[in-house]
């Protein structure tokens, strides 16, 4: 039902174009259904008129009305079922197509996009916003068609019975629509804020769930839900501020078109008209039967308008996700010959406001370990992200084996450059598959060897199903254990260049010791690998071949641990600060 010819149109524009024809067909079916389903109600009033008449053939006429009404009712229900079937089949196909489009855009997005956008925003787009589109495609258009057709048919028939009485039943509608217009304008003004508040809640939910294992390790059970509670409280306050001013007009609008209000209006006006001789008593029946039921389609019309407004906000957010910039692959792909890394006068700034990296030149030789140290905000992680091509330098260049990173295809680049993040991400799959993520063809022996090298093998064997335990189900790991699993993944990939970004940042004391032992073995057995270690704790990189000290985005000094201590500069100050702190804790 979804044409693939539409996949290359501008992202986010004309999202419904692939299914617009099917929706139009369903609306036409619904219009026919709504008109036919009204036939029994109209037939009821005609039946009453025939039965109270003195016509000799009234019995035959009555049965004819009943047969026609039953036939119209059956046909109407059949058309309604067909319309529902069309919209739900279309919605299923469209939702699948939309999610695939979103997944494709995200799969080809620059890695920097994910660090700049929250997981809550992605969750909202993939779930809540797609669900809002589901209601629009599967229900809202049919509800609007049903309500509009019912109103037009009912009032058309009522005007044919008595135009004066029909005008009386129309009197509440202008007041209702004036109030509802006020409600819709107030809602529309808050719709953008609604999306932002919902994103905060989604982000806090994701962070809360992901942080539970680490929080439990540290015993800070109360801290875990504070951010979630704040986000929920903020959403509650926003929602109450939004709906409080709308309660009075919404209640008043409901009273205006309530069945009891319409019944009172019809009876008072009808009795007066009969008393004046303007209409017969049987003519009051259609206004009592059809006039009272008009409140339901009017209410449906208003709720469908709200759904359209919600869908509009969802469309805007989905359009933003579908407009994610795509990672550009080099037009002329080059193959590097070697794994030496050179930063050549590299500068970088976020948004152009403040330079994080300023004119840095640095060479990482094969078989060497280079450590990046410095105070928080000095640019350590940013320099590592530049090497991983998560972000691109404002000026200068970075080469791998003599080839600029921008000229290396992404697939090859990430086979050449591996990384272990401080913020570990494991997938809901077996522990074995998590380790073999970058090298799925690896044997079980190779996976276990990597786990042993990362000092996590024994912990895996303690899990209910060992390496087949599913992370998030029967495999619950602490932050430090997850970090070691991430190191095992990198070791199994065995890339020529390996970046370790604050590998002990998420670990508790016991896990930190195990990770440091792992890193010490890794450093001592690096062979011809280029190893770049971003470290906060200087003791973890004492044996590095070259320790680069960053300050304000520049290289303040570099050398071995002994050389830097003898210079009595920034490194010595950082070492003394950490050593003194350790001594004080002891």
Image (cartoon, rainbow, N blue to C red):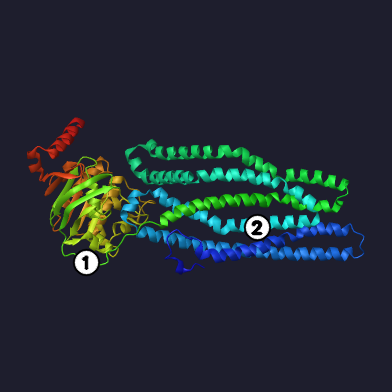
Q: Quadrant of residue 160?
A: bottom right
Number of numbered labels in the structure image: 2
Q: Is residue 299 above or below residue 49?
A: above
Label 2 to label 1: alpha-carbon separation: 61 Å
Q: Is residue 386 above or below residue 73?
A: above
Task: State the image coordinates of residue 534 (x, y, percent, origin top left).
Answer: 21, 47
Q: Is residue 468 left or right of residue 193?
A: left
Q: Is residue 306 left or right of residue 562?
A: right
Q: Quadrant of residue 103?
A: bottom left
Q: Which residue is mark 2?
A: 146
At x 42%, y 40%, the residue is: 228
Q: Secondary structure at mark 2?
A: helix
Q: Which residue is mark 1?
A: 334
Compare residues 395 and 311 and report the one nearer the observer: 395
At x 37%, y 46%, the residue is: 210
Task: State the image coordinates of residue 403 (x, y, percent, origin top left).
Answer: 18, 62
Task: State the image coordinates of residue 273 (x, y, percent, origin top left).
Answer: 84, 47
């Amino acid at each position: 039902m979804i044409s693939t010819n539409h996949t290359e149109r501008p992202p986010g524009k004309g999202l419904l174009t692939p299914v617009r024809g099917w929706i139009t067909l369903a609306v036409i079916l619904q219009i026919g259904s709504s008109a036919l389903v009204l036939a029994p109600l109209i037939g009821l009033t005609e039946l009453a008129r025939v039965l109270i008449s003195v016509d000799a053939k009234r019995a035959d006429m009555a049965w004819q009305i009943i047969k026609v009404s039953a036939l119209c009712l059956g046909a109407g229900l059949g058309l309604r079922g067909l319309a529902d079937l069309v919209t739900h089949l279309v919605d299923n196909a469209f939702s699948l197509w939309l999610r695939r489009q979103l997944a494709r855009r995200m799969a080809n997005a620059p890695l920097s996009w994910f660090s700049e956008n929250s997981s809550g925003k992605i969750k909202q787009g993939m779930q809540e916003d797609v669900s809002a589109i589901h209601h629009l495609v599967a229900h809202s258009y049919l509800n609007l068609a049903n309500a509009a057709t019912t109103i037009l048919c009912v009032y058309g028939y009522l005007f044919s019975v008595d135009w004066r009485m029909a005008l009386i039943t129309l009197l509440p509608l202008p007041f209702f629509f004036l109030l509802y217009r006020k409600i819709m304008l107030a809602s529309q003004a808050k719709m953008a804020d609604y999306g932002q508040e919902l994103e905060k809640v989604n982000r806090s939910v994701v962070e809360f769930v992901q942080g539970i294992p680490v929080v439990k390790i540290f015993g800070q059970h109360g801290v875990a839900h504070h951010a979630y509670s704040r986000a929920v409280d903020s959403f509650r306050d926003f929602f109450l501020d939004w709906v409080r001013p709308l309660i009075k007009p919404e209640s008043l609008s409901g009273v205006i078109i309530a069945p009891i209000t319409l019944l009172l209006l019809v009876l008072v006006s009808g009795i007066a008209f009969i008393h004046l001789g303007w209409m017969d008593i049987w003519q009051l029946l259609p206004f009592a039967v059809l006039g009272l039921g008009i409140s339901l389609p009017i209410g449906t019309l208003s709720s469908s308008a709200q759904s359209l407004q919600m869908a509009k906000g969802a469309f805007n957010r989905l359009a933003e996700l579908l407009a994610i910039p795509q990672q550009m692959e080099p037009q002329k792909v080059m193959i590097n010959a070697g794994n030496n890394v050179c930063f050549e006068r590299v500068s970088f700034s976020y948004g152009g406001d403040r330079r994080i990296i300023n004119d840095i030149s640095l060479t990482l030789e094969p078989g060497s370990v280079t450590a990046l140290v410095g105070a928080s905000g000095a640019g350590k992680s940013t320099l590592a992200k530049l090497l991983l091509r998560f972000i691109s330098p404002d000026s200068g260049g970075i080469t791998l084996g003599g080839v600029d990173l921008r000229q290396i295809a992404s697939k090859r680049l990430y086979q050449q450059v591996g990384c272990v993040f401080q913020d570990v991400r494991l997938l809901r799959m077996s522990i074995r598959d998590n380790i073999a993520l970058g090298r799925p063809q690896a044997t079980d022996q190779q996976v276990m060897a990597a786990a042993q090298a990362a000092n996590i093998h024994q912990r895996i064997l303690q899990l209910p199903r060992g390496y087949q335990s599913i992370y998030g189900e029967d495999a619950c790991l602490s932050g430090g254990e997850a970090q070691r699993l991430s190191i095992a993944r990198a070791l199994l990939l065995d890339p020529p260049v390996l970046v370790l970004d604050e590998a002990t940042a998420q670990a508790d004391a016991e896990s930190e010791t195990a990770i440091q032992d792992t890193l010490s073995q890794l450093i001592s057995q690096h062979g011809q690998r280029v190893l770049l270690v971003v470290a906060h704790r200087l003791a973890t990189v004492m044996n590095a071949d070259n320790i680069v000290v960053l300050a304000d985005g520049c290289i303040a000094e570099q050398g071995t641990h002994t050389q830097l201590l003898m210079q009595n500069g920034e490194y010595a100050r950082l070492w003394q600060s950490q050593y003194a702190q350790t001594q004080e804790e002891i």
